[in-house]
Structures are given as C-alpha cells and as structure tokens.
Image: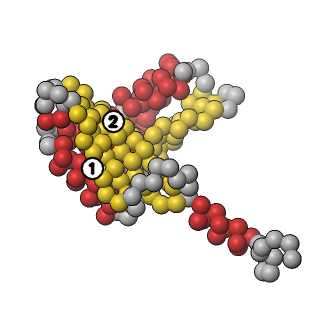
Amino acid sequence: MEDIKIREFIKDKQFQAGISRVAIERTEQKMRISIYTAKPGIVIGRQGSNIELLKKDLAKLTDSKLDINIIEVKSPDMDATLVAENVAGQLERRIAFRRAMKQCVGRTMRLGAKGIKITCSGRLGGAEIARTESYRDGSIPLHTLRANIDYGTAEAHTTYGRIGIKVWIYKGEVLPTVKAAAKKEAPEGQEGGAK
C-alpha cells in the first residue's frame, strides 16, 4: 500500500519529467527508490534542489531512510508508458487522435521496434458515443511467452471526458541471448545429450 502511494505521489509531483516507472527496493532500515525518467534534469533541478524537496515530501509518507536514484531513459519513444503519455499530451492539446497515434507509431518503428499497437478509448473527437480505435504496425505476439513486450497506459483529460490510451511495443524475443550464453558455457564436443 505504501509503495502505491509513493509511486502515485512521484508521478503527480513530477508529471512534466516523463517518468516511465518507479522501482522500490527495501532493506530493513533503508528504502531505495529508482526513478526512470526521460528528462532527468527536471527531476533533479538546479544543484539538486528538486530532489531534496522530493526527499522531504517522501519522508512524510514513510519511516524508512530514503535513497533516490535517477536513471535516464535513453530512447523515450521505445518505452510504452512514455509513448502513451505522449499521445495523452497530444490529445489534451486537441491534436486529432489518429494523427497522434500515427506519429508515435512511425517514430517507434524507426527506432527499431518489431511491432507496436496503440489503442485509444473514449469520446474520440468529442463524439457523443464512446468508441475504441487502435492503430498498429509490425507484429505483437501477445500469446508468445518469450516475446519482450513493453506495455504502458495513460489517461488524457479532455473537455469531453477521459480518454484511455494503451500501448504495446514488441522489442524482440528474450530467449535467443540465453541460448547463445548456454552454447558459450558448454565446452567443445559436449553439446547434446548422452552418447
């Protein structure tokens, strides 16, 4: 419960910083919070002023000693949560939802993603009846366990109400690297079973 409050507090407080995720690790006395962000400068502030304020505010929510790490997300267009927040921001600025989705799909695919799917649900374009529209490119194998799929959600608060955005980004398979590592470990002539 405490973790949820901390995550919500950080996301609300640092909304402009493009926070992808907040990882919380605990030991008996200490709590290490890792904030993955697209704009670390905004979170840290001038000479670390913002981070000190954040520490003071978080100290009120928890009794443990705090350690805050800021980790930069190198390519925000390959992070599902940040793509969803980008689409939400565009919808709030009254950009057409199809154009917003199409732009984000194009940028992500150019960066080397194997597939992407974006779904927008709600009163799209101010329509009276809510509906769901999605846009996809490449493949998204949701039933394949070894697929490395990043999933993120966001909400756009428009004058017509809330619009929910879901994003799936397929980055490739997870297992091939494990197989390659296993082959390197096995000495020559010992691959395969009993002979």
Residue lying at the far bottom in this picture: please name it.
189
The relative height of residue 143 versus residue 57 in the rendered view (above or below) is: below
* Mark 2 residue element: strand
Quadrant where the C terminus sits is: bottom right
Amino acid marked by disc 1: Tyr
Q: Residue at x 42, y 26 (%)?
A: 9
Horizontal and vertical percent position of residue 183 = 70, 72
Residue 189 location (% of width, % of height): 80, 81
- Residue at horizontal 31%, vertical 46%? 118
Q: Secondary structure at mark 1?
A: strand
Residue 66: x and y, percent? 56, 30
Marks 1 and 2 sit apart, C-alpha to C-alpha, by: 16 Å
Q: Nearer the viewer, residue 75 or 149?
A: 149
State the residue at coordinates (27%, 45%).
134
Give the mark, 1 or 2, whose residue is nearer the N terminus.
1
Q: Amino acid at mark 2?
A: Ala
Left or right relative to 71: residue 193: right
Instruction: Please give the residue where the numbered disc 2 appears in the rendered image.
Output: 154
Q: Are marks 1 and 2 in contact (CB under 8 Å)?
A: no
Q: Is residue 13 above or below residue 107?
A: above
Q: Which residue is mark 1?
A: 135
